[in-house]
Image: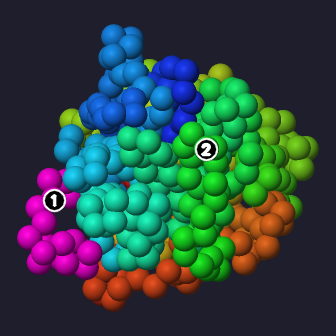
Amino acid sequence: MRLGECREECAVFGVYAPGEDVARLTYFGLFALQHRGQESAGIAISDGSGIRAHAQMGLVQQVFDEELLRSLTGNMAIGHTRYSTTGSSYRRNAQPVLDATPTGALALAHNGNLVNSQQLQQELLRQGTVLEATTDSSIMARLIAQRLAATGDIEAAVAEASRLWEGAYSVAVMTEGKLLAMRDPNGIRPLCVGTLNSQGYVVASETCGLNVVGAEFLREIEPGEMVVIDGGGLRSVRVVPAGRPAMCVFEFIYFARPDSHIYGTLLHEARRRMGHQLAQQHPAEADLVIPVPDTGWPAAIGFAEASGIPFGQALIKNRYIARTFIQPDQRQRELGVRLKLTAMREVLGGQRVVVVDDSIVRGTTKRALVALIRRAGASEIHVRIAAPPYRYPCFYGVDTSDRRELLAARLDSVEDIRLAIGADTLGYQTVDGLLEAIGLPRELFCMACFDGHYPVAVPDEVKARKFALEASPISPAATSKIAGDG
């Protein structure tokens, strides 16, 4: 994960494959999806007579070892990697979530965020329900478990519970005999399904999760659709009416892996075309185009292709820094760029450089990055950003906190942002250029982070907490005091 980015909540993976080593398949699937969350990892597995689970804080390879994988036997499994956006960063909030009912256990893995989780939690508390975890995912599991206890039918239980959920959710639910996967009516978070060895099925947040286990992509799960997988194969159930399509546009810009496909589009190619658009919109007289590792690479390649400026590698990423759960102080945060990136003086010395990155969110690390490149001897630094200005917080599962931490919301103009990060010039992608690069109409996407138009209504009390801005705007020189990084 690149230091200082906006972070997407988690990844979901599920497999139904009698006769296969489903625990190991899930491990590999989660490994491929690790970029979506590095805080915790977990696998729940069913052998037809019960569900066992293991989830801990840490990366997939830290949480699971060979002995543990051998002990997890069954014919289907679901898995999860997490970065917390609701609930705290504790072991009890690691997923999959387990819940028990008189008809058997269930497990749930969730990607996204409910905007009405507080209301649902309060209703459960009024009923006397005790929730051990503090995530909206645990609330979702409890609502399903209540209805499963009443009806004995997991399909009906998921369908009824989902009608209470408002917001973003791509979920995998597993009982002792069935695997179910579902997306919210707007399809804000991705979810797809593939076939495995003619008789098995795999569901995953991204197609890269299918590829790593040898599954063949079948299709994306539709907004409002639930797929049910059991011994009878795969069935589709329309659970809630589909709403306006609202796939998070940042899946195309940053979140999803470049080798994944969404809406039939290879994300590497879409990001390369974003670089083409940037070169047309914001040309620069320069000697070298360099990417910010790793997510700036495709757009930087595209910028170099379209501009004719040579492409080079001048920033080296330390790939052996695992996520730490020791909270650094502010000085350590500000020095984090030096820990993760090294600038090569031999490449940058005396050069006019175009630095291409996917986005600017909080701004602190971009300022440190520009300073790092300038200390390495670059004579001019022209920053080009593949996304439009990020002005509004997300309520659907992205860790962008509140507006006071978003640089483009705090400063009045691109010139002010340029001064804040210390670049010689700064150019952002336009919304039209972004859509041209993606090759799909605006009506398919949620772009609330750019324009503040939220596809799912956000309760006023929830929105108010993230929308507060201090009365007086900050000066560019004061941006280093903004909390967080980005």
**110 is higher (above) or lower (below) than 409:** above
- Give whichever of 332, 432 is nearer the camera: 432
Q: Which residue is drawn at 27% across and 61% down?
A: 149
Q: Name the residue under label 1.
A: 131
- For the question of whether residue 427 can be seen, the reply is yes
Q: Does the magenta stretch include residue 127?
A: yes
Residue 273 in the figure: left or right of residue 484 = right
Figure quadrant of the C terminus = bottom left
Are the residues at dot 2 and dot 1 in contact (C-beta closer than 8 Å)?
no
Q: Is residue 307 magenta?
A: no
Please name the colour scheme applied to the rendered image. Answer: rainbow
Q: Mark 2 points at which residue?
A: 232
Where residue 292 sits in the image (x, y, percent)?
A: 61, 41
- Going by the numbered disc 2, the residue's amino acid type is Gly
- For the question of whether residue 8 can be seen, the reply is no
- Quadrant of the rendered image containing residue 3: top left
- Give whichever of 360, 416 is nearer the camera: 360
Q: Which residue is drawn at 28% across and 47% down?
A: 104
- Give the mark, 2 or 1, whose residue is nearer the N terminus: 1
Where residue 332 sits in the image (x, y, percent)?
A: 28, 39
SS assignment at label 1: loop
- Going by the numbered disc 1, the residue's amino acid type is Leu
> Distance between the Cα atoms at labels 2 and 1?
34 Å
**232 is higher (above) or lower (below) than 425:** above
Provide the residue span drawn in magenta: 118-135
- Give whichever of 445, 223 is nearer the camera: 223
